[in-house]
Image (cartoon, grey):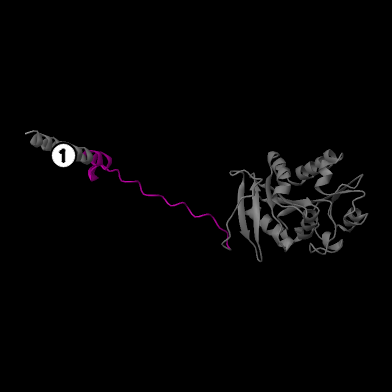
Amino acid sequence: MKIVMTLCATVLLLANAGCAHTDRRAAADPSPSATTTPAPLTPSPPAPTDAAGNPIVRPSCSAPAEGRYLHVPGPKVIASVLILGDGPRGVVVGAQANGSICQTIAFGRLLTRQGYHVALFDWQDPYAETMITATKALIADGASRVVLGGFSRGALVALGVAPALAPKVAGVFSISGGPSATEGFPTVASLSRYSGPILLVSGADDAVFPKGTTEAIAKAHHGSETVLVVPGSAHALGLLDSSDGPRVQAAIDLFLRQTLR
């Protein structure tokens, strides 16, 4: 009798164990009717690319929502252009030979706060085409009258290309500009063909161009010009950081106000 009872107890224990195992698996694996269907994944939009298929990546110095960053195709190159502000009074600013949008963005922001519609750009060779393409982009964005200008390379290229963009160009400001075969304008004459108003600023002892270059451009220019030669050897953007920086900035401000009334 004990043997029978023991066998029965063993059978019952095994049955209970089997039921307990079945219950745990059922709890861990709910019925199909209780399963939540995952939402379909939304594909990420493709990264914007320019006409050549290259990704359009905003410069690191520019905030994500700052202005409008464009890759604008020209005849030979695609120009990277950052447009700040809006309105009819446009200013195109070219950087030095060692610079790009990020070199001139602080100056561009200052002009924007003063109410100007500004285009900054990265250099590509041919340099003249790059500035012309940036200017046309600014005009397409709503600038009806434009002043070209810049620092060193930006200055001389602005003087050189201005005749090709007339009558939209209202004037040119040149901070430490001079003839350069590398940039495509090898002589004083090539920088003096624009007949509109120009502002010429340089340091008296600037070693980048021969002494008297600024005065020579002014003499060859057939139109109204304002000349400011300050003491020292500071060049281009360095002039704004020099002790004469306020005088240089004031000259630029006055020229823009008078030219873009």
Q: Which residue was labeled with disc 1?
A: 15
9 horizontally vs 178: left or right:
left
Residue depicted at 76% across the width and 45% down the height: 256
The residue shown at (62%, 45%) is 67
Label 1 Cα crowd, 10 Å radius (few <14 / some 14-19 / many 20+): few
Look at 56% across and 58% down and name the residue there: 49
Which sits in the foreground, 172 or 54?
A: 54
Asked whether residue 39 is drawn in magenta, I would say: yes
The image position of residue 248, as x and y in percent, is 83, 42
Query: 132 left or right of 53?
Result: right
Residue 124: give x, y in percent of width and height. Answer: 70, 60
- Residue 121 percent coordinates (x, y): 69, 53
Q: Nearer the viewer, residue 92 or 1?
A: 1
Local secondary structure at mark 1: helix
Q: Is residue 153 visible?
A: yes
Is 43 left, or right, of 24 in this rendering? right
Quadrant of the image for the N terminus? top left
In terms of secondary structure, what is the magenta stretch mainly? loop
Amino acid type, callout 1: Ala
On the rendered image, what quadrant is the C terminus found in? top right
Residue 261 seen: no
Classify residue 254 by image quadrant.
top right
Q: Quadrant of residue 53?
A: bottom right
Q: Nearer the viewer, residue 174 or 41?
A: 41
Give above or below for 128 relative to 109.
below
As displayed, is residue 259 above or below residue 194? Answer: above
Q: Which residues are magenta?
A: 23-51
